[in-house]
Image (cartoon, rainbow, N blue to C red):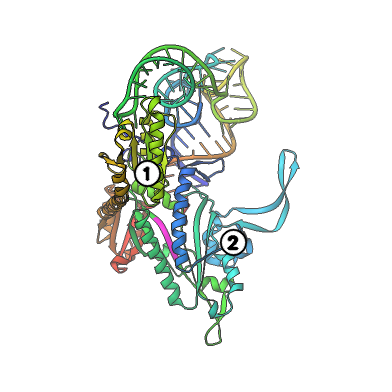
Amino acid sequence: MGKKHRTAITPTRAEDFPEWYQQVIKAADMAENSPVRGCMIIKPYGFALWENIQRVFDGWLKDYGVQNASFPLLIPLSFLEKEAEHIDGFAKECAVVTHHRLEAGENGLVPAGKLEEPYVIRPTSETIIGDAMSRWIQSYRDLPMKLNQWSNVMRWEMRTRLFLRTSEFFWHEGHNAFETPEEAKDDCLIILGMYEKFFEEYLAFSGFTGIKTPDERFPGALETYAFEAVMQDGKALQAATTHDLGQTFSRSCNITFQGRDGTEQLAHTTSWAFSTRVIGGMIMIHGDDDGMMMPPRIAPQQVIILPFIKDESTEDDIYSFAQDVADKLKAQGVRVHIDKRDMRSSDKMWDAVKKGVPVRVEIGGREVEKGEVTYVRRDIGRDSKETLSVDGFLKKLPTVLGDIHDAMLARSKAFRDEHTIDGETVSDIEEFFAADRIGLMKVPVSVLDDADLEAVMKKHSLSTRCMPFADNGKKVLIGKAY
RNA sequence: CGGAGCGUGGCGCAGCCUGGUAGCGCACCUGUUUUGGGAACAGGGGGUCGGAGGUUCGAAUCCUCUCGCUCCGACCA
């Protein structure tokens, strides 16, 4: 009692942001490190979030005419070698499969059966999908071709962090091919728009959409477009990208088609993706000192029902009442969970808080007696506590979930805006970051030509994030990034 | 891959400098009393100290090597 300031997560964001991040993941039971270096185990609660993300966005992709397919995990080394710039970008982080058998050796099993041509575990699939496309595309009538796969990829990272950067990660990778450069460019912009809409409408955060500067481009791309979000520690997170690959990959993969004029032409391709990294973004954008805060539309559980059992005699009544409420919520399409674990209710409550379940419903003897429920919003806390009739609650819940979403989005937007500071010169940048201020600095693109910029960027480990569309490409965002 | 730090029961840590076979908080189990919000008391279970080797009568403590993790940096979704 009286310990008003005790937070569910130690340390707090202000005390140690990276450590806070780790602790939130642990407290919310979303993921953990695995015995495999750099690879994480996504636990059921975290994976349920990813599944919801997949389910919603997959529907959007299909509406856009994208077809799902599945390509091999292993890519022949020679495929990667086809595109010089591409291999240059990924070679350093490829895991290589060189053998196809194990044999008993002196000290246990040893690899045997050396492969003539090694395979690379896909760091991305441009080359192998390009190879397939080269066979599937013959005529302009086969275009556009829009393919996607939900898959895992592997990049041997120097330094990993759960969700944000792991050696193996999950994503979707889309690969489209078009007849004209205009279509390819439009495709990039359309999909980037879908990402932005998805992040805002489902993950409840906004960021900046824009064009990457040349040095931040995908290896082999003509142009890279990105969605950059701002985390609570002021660092930027590239949450999604689309790449206009021009004819780079169609040239190296031989994706040709016979055009309307009868001549053989190279297709214009694009690739685009977001990964499990967005979950890391959600944590760093929405989480607070009491743990995770799930955006309602994508939350694994939208409502958690906590039965408050005072004595055994009321247990059955409370459970059946809770079940009844849960059934009605389910009928309404709400993802609801009843926490029947044999624990003290206060512990269950904090567990729900740490997991970030948007709405907590408390049902005890009083509620059962009066046919009511008491609920609390995760984003507001105790002050939002309200007791309603069951029907009243059922009717109001959609609005409540919507309000929570709106509030979370508004907060992330306000944070982004407050932490995007306008500057004019290199010395403005230097001053800002030397003062340990958090956020991004937005300067005119002409600053990129300033010879002093590189040193300042290096000194404060900054990078250009993107040239926002909102500024018509006249400004560039510079900051620290994940 | 460079710099720093850390690896001791499920979690967080102390012990290590000044070697003598392990301790605290939380969690867990049992019981009693509690119970609308992170309960109290009593009793109890669990670790051989990341791994390997070495020094020593004796090592969590010293030495060497190794693996892993975290932070900062370079590289990247």
Q: Is residue B30 left or right of residue A412?
A: right
| Tag in front: 1 or 2 | 1
Depicted A365 relative to depicted A303: above or below: above
A198 sits to left or right of B21: left
Quarter location, residue A445: bottom left
On whether residue A22 falls in the magenta region, the answer is no
Tell me which amino acid carries mark 2.
Answer: Phe
Give me the chain letter of mark 2.
Answer: A
Q: Is residue A400 visible?
A: no
A176 and A318: which one is in front?
Answer: A318
Q: Main secondary structure of the magenta part?
A: strand
Crowd rating for badge 2 (residues with CA inside 10 Å; few <14, some 14–19, many 20+):
some
Q: Amino acid at mark 1?
A: Val
Q: Secondary structure at mark 2?
A: loop
x and y, in percent, of residue A29 in the image: 45, 39
Q: Are marks 1 and 2 on the same chain?
A: yes
Residue hosting label 1: A303
Residue at (44, 64) in percent of width and height: A242
Q: Which residue is mark 2?
A: A71
Spot occupied by residue A395 in the image (x, y as percentages of width and height): 30, 49
The residue positioned farthest toward the bottom in the image shown: A261
Compare marks 1 and 2 and give the one earlier in the sequence: 2
**Residue at disc 1, secondary structure:** strand
> In this picture, which residue range is highlighted in magenta?
A238-242
Report which quarter residue A344 is drawn in: top left
Picture coordinates of residue A3 (x, y %)? 27, 28
